[in-house]
Image (cartoon, rainbow, N blue to C red):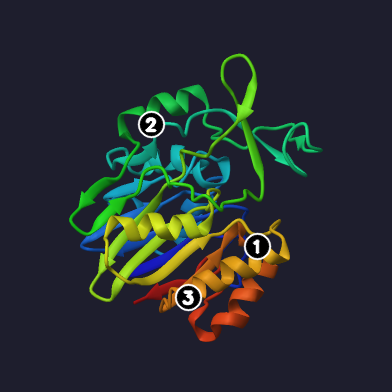
Amino acid sequence: MKFRFLIENKTDNPGIIAEHGLSVYIEAQGKKILFDAGATNLFAANAATMKVDLSAVDFAVISHGHYDHTGGFPMFHQINPEAPIYIHRNALRVSYGCEGGALGEGGILDKEPCSIAWKEEELKALSPQLMFTDGPFKVSENIIITGTVPVGDDFVPTEHFYCSDGKDLVEDDMSHEQCLVIREPEGLYIFSGCSHRGVINAINAGKAMFPGERIAALVAGMHLYSASVEDRKRVVDEIAGENMDTVMPVHCTGIKAICDLKSKLGDKCFVATAGDEYLV
């Protein structure tokens, strides 16, 4: 397996541009896969610099319906108008982030939506490629898209999102978040875009796709930048308890959680940046 970070929030690679977003190019099981496409067309520019041929991608996966993971897909359509793009059926709803807590409890709604920002004509052009998921979808015997990540009883969201039900704003349950799981001989590789439903829930969703298999690697935005010290410690301890070979905290994880993971896991924790390549 080989995967390359086309987009990540940071980079130390000359000639590569970072932005707030995520895009990972994966080669596994004889397939070429695009997992998310960042916030803009920069993922394609970086791909060209890294000599990644996006026209050869077999299929793409959208982790969830937010702009910083989907903004590049109209460009992807221009480069590759044939590859299926697996997206959750609830991902096209318009939603807003809410800073500081829930509405009515001190939270302040963002002025601009955080949802997919495709123009009407872009959505129309993309529509033939969009393959809508809900529950688990088996791409092949060893590649599964989880569909909606189930939420455990102990999950506490670190940020609230709201969408319209046609009349009022209601809390977005983030049911459009899904993970990509690839089974290799050494174990499972779980890719999660933001883990808005909790990174532990994302891990559990991945394990449920292949019961009894160990996890070899977790590549995930973990959305812990606004988590409490107690929640960060609990999550880090649970991740460490999985005894994975590799953990890559990216994108929205937050520098404090990244430092906590690195301190706890040592050489098993890799701090990936845009332009990085991993061969496993």
Q: Position of residue 10 (x, y in %)?
A: 62, 64
Mark 2, residues whose alpha carbon is within 10 Å: few (<14), some, or many (≥20)? many
The disc label shown at residue 188, or none: none
Q: Nearer the viewer, residue 192 or 84?
A: 192
Q: Which quarter of the image is occupied by the C terminus?
A: bottom left
- Residue at 29%, 55% in the rendered image: 209
Asked whether residue 39 appears in the rendered view, the answer is: yes
How many residues crowd mark 1 within 10 Å: few (<14), some (14–19), many (20+)?
some
The residue under label 3 is 241
For marks 2 and 3, the one nearer the N-term is 2
> Which comes before the other along the chain, label 3 or label 1?
1
Query: Residue 169: which quarter of the image?
Result: top right
User: In what element is the residue under mark 3?
Assistant: helix
* Quadrant that contains the N terminus: bottom left
Identify the residue under disc 1. 231
Q: Is residue 221 left or right of residue 122?
A: right
Question: Is 211 rendered above or below residue 74?
Answer: below
Q: Which sits in the foreground, 22 or 13? A: 22
The residue identified by callout 2 is 126
- Name the element at disc 2: helix
Mark 2 is on which residue type? Answer: Leu
